[in-house]
Every structure is written in structure tokens, then in C-alpha cells.
Image (tube, rainbow, N blue to C red):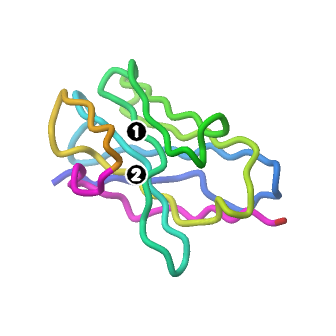
Amino acid sequence: QVQLTESGGGLVQAGGSLRLSCAPSGGAFTGYTVGWFRQAPGTEREFVAAINWNGGSTAYADSVKGRFTISRDNAKNTVYLQMFSLEPEDTAVYYCARAVRRWLFSDNGLMASYNSWGQGTQVTVSS
């Protein structure tokens, strides 16, 4: 079973930037969509962004469009989430996930489309 590990979270002031990374162990991202989700206290986990197997297609939640960029480096087996213009509302635990189906772009934003999850990394944006 593949294990995913997120890194790069932290505390940042509003308007600042962070870059999150996600890498697998015991498996690979080759051929799979990888997504980012987030969960703030007292809320449900929500979709943030997804990228297809070769980086040619991406999808974003409306709340992050124009501020966040998802990318991947298949040579390094790593997926990134670059976050700009962070807002206090972006404060959450961020999770990466690998899609169930290989080669198909899972861009519906549904958690059920993913079956491997990381433990999450905390992002806190102060006002």
C-alpha cells in the first residue's frame, strides 16, 4: 500500500506564500492523478486542486483559482502545491491523495476518487 507524505506547511502572514510537497513511499505516482484537499476545524474535507498523470491537465476549486498552482515532477516522483496570496480562510490541514484509477484524470473533486492519503500538513495564515 502506497504511503503519502506531505511537507512544507507552516505559519505565514496573510498575503504570503507557501509551497507544499507530496511524495509517495511504497509506491509511485506514475500514471495517477494526484489531488490536494484541505480540512479546516469543524468543516468537511474539501477539494483544492488536482493534476493528471503527466501534468498536462489541472483542476482547481473556485476558491483557489488564480492563487494556487499544482504541478508535478515525475522524475522526482513529487507533486507540489504552490500557494500565493494566502488568506486566513486558507488555514487548514492540507492532504494529498492518489487517485484510484490509473491514467484517467480524476477532476471531479470527489474524495471517493482517491484511495491513498497522506497524514496532512498544517497551514496557518495569520491576519
Of marks 1 and 2, the one in the foreground: 1
| Circles 1 and 2 in contact, beta carbons < 8 Å | no
Nearer to us in this view, 124 or 77: 124
> Helix, strand, or loop for circle 1?
strand
Give the label on residue 38, or none.
Answer: none
Q: CA distance from mark 1 to mark 2?
A: 9 Å
Amino acid at the residue labelled 2: Cys
Residue 94 percent across, percent down from the top left: 50, 59
51 left or right of 121?
left
> Helix, strand, or loop for circle 2?
strand
Residue 127 percent across, percent down from the top left: 84, 65
Which residues are the magenta region? 110-126
68 left or right of 76?
right
Q: Quadrant of the N terminus?
A: bottom left
Residue 116 percent across, percent down from the top left: 24, 54
- The answer to if 118 sits in the magenta stretch is yes
Amino acid at the residue labelled 1: Ala
Give the label on residue 96, or none.
Answer: 2
Residue 79 percent across, percent down from the top left: 44, 36
